[in-house]
Amino acid sequence: MIKISDIYKVYKNGTIANRNLSFNISSGEILGIIGSNGAGKTTLVRQIVGLSRPTSGKIEIDDINFINRRKDYMHCIAFSNQNVVLLEAQTAFEVVYFAGIFRGLNRKDSKHQTDELLEYFGINTERGKRLANLSGGQKKLVLLAAAFVGHCPIIVLDEPTNDLDPINRSRLWDIVRCYNDRLKVTFIIVSHNLSELENVARKVIIMRGGSIVDQGDLQMLKGKYNSGYQISLKCKYEDLHKLLQNINFPYEIENQNEVIVRIEEDDLLHVSQNMLPMVQKFGVELKIFRASLMDIYQTIQEEK
């Protein structure tokens, strides 16, 4: 278990990046951290992986103070971020291979895992190229491969899908699920892509202004902020006015021909039955879906 207790981080210029943050991460959990730019997310994870020291507070791994014994735990935590400046002169193969050696793999096993990961992420043909000569997306894939080599029990990913095409985004989330299910790897993921994060994270921390505004199980948060459903009604633009005259519930208009109705769970059956005649009369496309992580985030931002 990772235990964060009252982490406070202030920089020399007086900027407060984290304000008394406290939460626990269970072994084998997938935690998502979300928030606007400047919310303190990256500062937080840099402290968790040992690249920055908190001004005050404690970071414990299995009840041991990680802050005072960072060197003993560095091989147990993998971190993938945006900064590749120090690795520009190395080849794609070297970056991943030496990450495996650093984490205790022998040469044979590190080469084997490196070959597998470079092939998996579709960059095996670039293995001999220096990072300085790769595209932004290719560099990102190399750093991700380096995070997964060695099977660290804790992997921290900061904006992992930036610069990735849809295929490699899907590959990333597949390997996250695989490592979590089969190897019980604990993941901490910072991302602005809430729809993707919602499909993998089980617990979410929402940050703003260096503080945690809420946290908890994703389903629990959905119940707290919007326990109901959304019904989407799409029709021809010329039929929209007539459709609205038949709706007796609060609604929002989106995309000129789409109506969104938000309802509580207890009203779902009643409301959906009342809307079926509209589907037939106006040729409406009807979809029903639960509140999303984006809905929760927007609600919190509106409360600000």
Image (cartoon, rainbow, N blue to C red):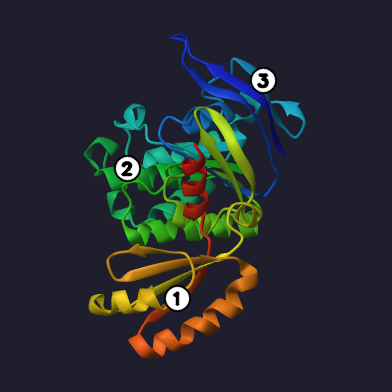
Q: Are marks 2 and 3 in contact (CB under 8 Å)?
A: no
Q: Measure how far apart labels 2 and 3 are at the Cα level.
A: 34 Å
Name the residue that disc number 1 marks: 287
Hey, what amino acid is under mark 1?
A: Lys
Hey, what amino acid is under mark 3?
A: Gly
Quadrant location of the N terminus in the rendered image:
top right
* Residue 45 in sight in this render: yes
Q: Measure how far apart labels 1 and 2 are at the Cα level.
A: 39 Å
Name the residue that disc number 2 marks: 139
Q: Is residue 291 shown left or right of residue 6?
A: left
Residue 233: percent from left, percent from top: 39, 75
Hey, what amino acid is under mark 2?
A: Lys
Please give the name of the residue rendered at 28% of the width and 54% of the height, measured from the top-left corner. 125
Residue 132: percent from left, percent from top: 25, 35
Q: Is residue 85 shown left or right of residue 50?
A: left
Q: Measure how far apart labels 3 and 1 are at the Cα level.
A: 47 Å
Q: Is residue 82 above or below residue 122?
A: above
Q: Quadrant of residue 59?
A: top right
1 or 2: mark nearer the eye: 1
Task: Point out which mark residue 57 bears.
Answer: 3
Q: Earlier in the sequence, mark 2 or mark 3?
A: 3
Name the secondary structure under disc 1: strand
Q: Earlier in the sequence, mark 3 or mark 1?
A: 3
Name the secondary structure under disc 3: strand
